[in-house]
């Protein structure tokens, strides 16, 4: 029996491979449109003035971004920031990769006096204070959106509301 067991026990002379010391790369799970970081207008986006607590913020509704994000500057005013473990990488449509390591859970914010609650991922956003992505759009479906006139209708509490985006400052009757 001892001879049989010796066949299945590891030999002390065999070197075991060293564990891989390189951390596994975090899979890219989130996307951010170029409009979200450049501030340039783009199709299927609209801007809103909003509030986070008592702070006025500029919000971009962006169907090209996967998640809802908040800028690091505005996040500094959020009372309950939590670490995101593990941090995730966010790929910008221009190829840049940003790292998100914090979020504000269940943050209250508003547009046109209507209050919403979202988990806000923190990123260095140079052009907007908040990006509302597809996660936010999906959570308020079904909705109607008129991109050319910059409004959307969505379910809110027991009814439907319409949010009016900021219209361009072109004079009425201007040709593009």
Image (spheres, rainbow, N blue to C red):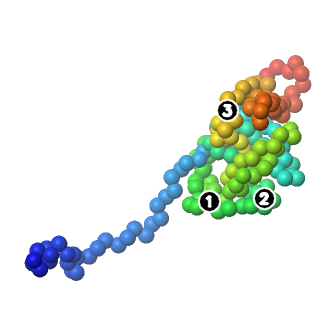
Using the image as rendered, state which of residue 28 and residue 145 is in the foreground. Answer: 145
Q: Residue at x 55, y 48 (%)?
A: 29
Disc 1 or 3, which lies upstream in sequence? 1
- The part of the image, by quadrant, that contains residue 139 is top right
User: Does any portion of residue 33 appear in the rendered image?
Assistant: no
Residue 37 location (% of width, % of height): 70, 46
Please rate how many residues cluster around mark 3, counting C-alpha atoms within 10 Å: few if below 14, some from 14 to 19, many from 20.
Answer: few
Above or below: residue 53 compared with residue 168: below
Structural distance between the alpha carbons of marks 1 and 3: 27 Å
Q: Mark 2 points at which residue?
A: 78
Please rate how many residues cluster around mark 1, counting C-alpha atoms within 10 Å: few if below 14, some from 14 to 19, many from 20.
Answer: some
User: Does any portion of residue 92 appear in the rendered image?
Assistant: yes
Q: Quadrant of the N terminus?
A: bottom left
Q: In which quarter of the image is the C terminus?
A: top right
Residue 66 location (% of width, % of height): 62, 42
Q: Nearer the viewer, mark 1 or mark 3?
A: 3
Structural distance between the alpha carbons of marks 2 and 3: 27 Å
Q: Which residue is drawn at 87% across and 18% down?
A: 173
SS category of the residue bearing label 1: strand
Please rate how many residues cluster around mark 2, counting C-alpha atoms within 10 Å: few if below 14, some from 14 to 19, many from 20.
Answer: some
Q: Which circle marks residue 84 in the picture?
A: 1
Q: Which residue is drawn at 13% across and 73% down?
A: 7
SS category of the residue bearing label 2: loop
Q: Name the residue under label 3.
A: 141
């Amino acid at each position: 029996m001892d001879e049989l067991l010796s066949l299945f026990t590891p030999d002390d002379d065999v070197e075991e491979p060293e564990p891989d010391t390189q951390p596994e790369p975090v899979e890219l799970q989130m996307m951010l449109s170029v409009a979200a970081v450049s501030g340039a207008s783009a199709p299927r986006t609209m801007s809103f003035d909003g509030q986070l607590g008592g702070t006025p913020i500029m919000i971009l509704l962006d169907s090209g971004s996967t998640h809802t994000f908040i800028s690091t500057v505005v996040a500094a005013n959020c009372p309950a920031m939590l670490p995101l473990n593990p941090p995730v990488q966010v790929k910008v449509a221009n190829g840049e990769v940003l790292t998100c390591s914090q979020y504000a859970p269940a943050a209250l914010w508003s547009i046109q006096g209507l209050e919403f609650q979202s988990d806000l991922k923190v990123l260095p956003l140079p052009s907007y204070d908040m990006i509302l992505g597809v996660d936010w759009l999906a959570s308020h479906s079904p909705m109607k959106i008129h991109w050319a006139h910059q409004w959307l209708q969505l379910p809110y509490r027991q009814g439907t509301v319409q949010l009016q985006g900021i219209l361009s400052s072109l004079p009425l009757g201007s040709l593009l």
